[in-house]
Amino acid sequence: MDRAGPGKTVGNSGQGEGGYVRRYLSVLALVAVLGLVAAACGGDDGGGTGATGATSATGASGELQPGGTVELAMLGDVSAAFDPQKEYYSVTWEWYRCCLLRTLLSYNGKTTAEGGADLQPDIASALPEISSDGLTYTFTLKSGVNYGDPFGDVSVTSGDIVRALERESDPDASVGGYNFYYNVIDGFADFGAGKADSIKGLETPDDSTLVVTLTEPAGYLPYLFAMAASAPIPPNGDAPLGAAEGHTKDYGRFLVATGPYQFLGSENLDFSVPADEQTPVAGYEPGKSVQLVRNPNYDPATDGLRPAYPDGFNISIGGDNNDLYNKVQAGELDGVVDGIVPPPVLRTYSTDPTLQPLLHINPSDAVRYISFNVAQPPFDDIHIRKAVNLALDKAGMRTFRGGESVGEIAGHIMVNSLEDNLLADYDPYATPNSAGDVTAAQAEIAQSKYDTDGDGVCDAPECSNILAVTDEADPYPDQAALIQQNMEPLGLTFDVKSFERTTMYAKCNEPEAHVAICLAPAWGKDFPDGYTFADPLFGSAAIFPSCCNYELLGASADLLSKAGYTVTDVPSVDDQIKTANQQTGDARFQGWADLDTTLMEDVVPWAPYLFDNNVDITSVRIVNYSFDQFAGLAAYDAYAIAPDAQ
Amino acid sequence: MEHALTDGGPDGPIDPEATSVEVSQQVVGRSPWELFWRRFRRDKFALGGAFIVIIMFAIALLSPVLASATHGPNEVHLDALDSFGIPTGPSSTFPFGVDTAGRDLMVRVAYGARTSLFIAFFATGIATLIGVTLGMLAGFYRGKIDTVISRTIDIVLSLPVLLLALGLVSACGLSPNGCLGGIIKPGLLLVSYVIGLFSWPYIARIVRGQVLSLREKEFIESARSLGSTNRRIMFREVLPNVAAPIIVYTTLIIPNNILFEAALSFLGIGVPQETPSWGRQLSDAGSIFTVAWWMMLFPGLFLFFTTLAFNLVGDGLRDALDPRTGG
């Protein structure tokens, strides 16, 4: 696996942090931060199910009327200027899914309960046929799915999907993206490395058929064809990459849509001239604004997934989180895409019955946790790691984020929807009121080699001034104060260093930084399958320079010694991940649940504390809201504007 | 005409003018300190300022006592937050309310006085040391030394101070090891250095100007003709005579430096996050003051009164030490 960076990240701090994913990318040049939901994600991910308040699908009795332009704001720009092979960011994923790009398979833009985690045929006419050995997937395409301007008369063919994946395999075109997922396709990596003329495992017997061959069974494969990296790229003469030819760095600004919307000015794109003479779309000014208008070539008859009520979207980029939410309250904006509802605003909308319908709270399939470096004393001792799990006041950690509505207390690692709720009531470190249990924690400490007199208080020097890293944005510093207070009775004291978010993730990810405990990470799913909570987090291939195995699970003795660790042997779950990934159906859910319990009880790499919710508020003129479980954000095409406000 | 603060023994000149004024009125000889004090104590604003400064010092020194009597500065009180994590206001338990982490704001503000006063004096000390040394050298030796030092002053004064300070603090504050091979580590000291490095030119300029005129005075000539070395002249003759402006300007840059620290902390790059600082407290309050006014009011009041007090004292000192301004 040659992933180069953290996965899609989940952020979510109180401050206007919209650009953190972008910054992270630019610093590391490759990031697959799965979890930062940050501010950047106006709710980017989340996960719990015990949310209070309104749920998705509000609305509106009576007919919803199409029309009007939705006014939105994003605190930060998207992470890779809308380039579908590079974007590894939930906000962009939602703009692709709802509006710009159709894929062979997709989602209905609703919650898990409403089928939002289930794959639906989109460009494909049905779900793929899978061979009995699990190695061959055959997709059949619908006819009559056309591109947006300027290719309105061109229909999508299977070769266009192959074109997109060929671009995805090119490390330059997909930098910062998630091409590691596609390595399971036979010949994908070889093509990217220039060792082959085509991707052997992608065959197109005709324009409406795509046959995918894998090197090993991988139950998550269909999900890869619901991600924008596999969205068709139209042909352009005989250029191998079609419309994307010559746009290795900036295809996003020349993006040819397939969805119900396209960038304003797409009709002026001229792909007949050389790439460097082409003028980008007017509807996207990086760092400033995005304007989407209806795609005149889109035929709703071919699409059952997108209601597409508004006529368009005006999205401003930049601003201050509090200001933007004030504008939503004042009706100047309809919503904030990547903001964090400030606690006072959340309180107002939660307690005022007339405002409650405008508050939308949904589990966003992300987890927040504290990670332990299992190679760094004192966290090389499982008793210390268990003790932290027991002593942590998880309810207090949640209070700092805004209280019960921001999510459900996490008792384990994977969000429940990825395990079919098999572990919904599981919490091996449950404490009264989730407020931590010092006595139980001290009993663990007493078994540790770092507690020489066995009194339940760590007395070894390793337990003092432990290097901890956290995010400098709210509410992480407040949380850090609580963590320190919780751990003090155990004899654990910390040297807490606060960093800007991308730096924080980089420090946690780098073995040579010897960060013992990372206080602020979060992780959101890439697609509704446990694999995205397994391999990129706990697989040994996800250790630096890849991402995001901060715990160094499965690190080789060689790697540990090179990074300056005295610990030579750390636990590994590589085999268990592989086993689970070969399963399908219910056995697959069970596989992930088993991995989760192993991690929680026998490995203890984390102290997870919150399954995040996405919290949105909308203006009064939005009369329909739907939550897209895939991206963990509002399904923007489902926003409907009240007829009298259009 | 400059005013000597010491009567200086055989080498030190006594300012003839100031003394003669007093002599004509009261016929009693007074030391310059006595004269200063007589003027200063007539200035009610300056006395009030001095009183506040003393109180702030007391608060800073006694903050651990306050903490042990109430709550520790880092003690988190989750029960002082409402169910949305919003802090509660002043109460009998928490007279100033709590901050977003549920910490006693009164104790935090008291600890903030330590940070502010430490910065005020340490950073100002650095600035004064550099400023006086370079100012004296430039004024005394003139020529190339003066040119080099004066142009350096011009350059430092023309730098965009806040931007550069931002850069320095973030560069040295990013890594736990600091920068320049670990010489400069992040924290209170780093901030002090940065502030000191940007405030010395004001003092250097004043001192240089004073020394330039002093070095032509007769008492310097006489010292020189008696065979005094340059060093002796600088330390025994010149320095005592520039002490008054040094004291005045030092006092006046103290509030500037307190505000500088507050600004840096407000921007999130000042003292370390867990260190209580008025600037950081104000910054934290920024996003929530509409529902938690106390988080902005109390640190703001303390910052305001402290800087005001130092300014009043500085003005009083100037009036009392410089007879030409009356007083």
Image: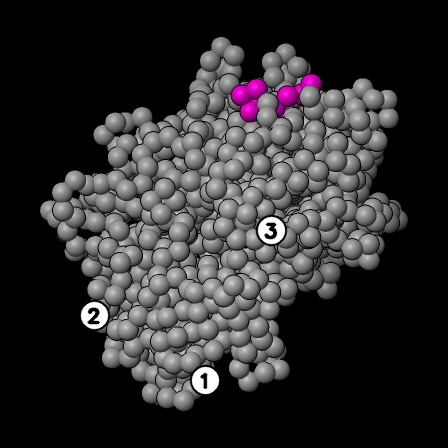
Q: Residue at the front extreme?
A: A132
Upstream in sequence: badge 2 or badge 1: 1
Task: Report the magenta residues as a range.
Answer: A432-439
Is B314 magenta? The answer is no
The residue closer to the viewer here, B248 or A99, is: A99
Q: Name the residue rendered at 65%, 27% in the picture.
A: A390
Query: Under tag 3, what secondary structure?
Result: helix
- Label 2 vs 3, first from the N-terminus: 2
Alpha carbons under labels 2 and 3: distance apart: 45 Å
Residue at (55% x, 64% y) in the render: A133
Circle 2 packing at 10 Å, graded few (<14), some (14-19), many (20+), is some
Q: Nearer the viewer, mark 2 or mark 3?
A: 3
Mark 2: amino acid: Pro
Place residue B53 in its image quadrant. Answer: top right
Instruction: Give the mark count.
Output: 3
Q: Looking at this view, is A55 or A32 the one in front?
A: A55
| Label 1 SS | loop
Task: Return the chain for callout 1.
Answer: A
Residue that carries the numbered disc 3 in the rendered image? A580
Q: Is residue A519 visible?
A: no
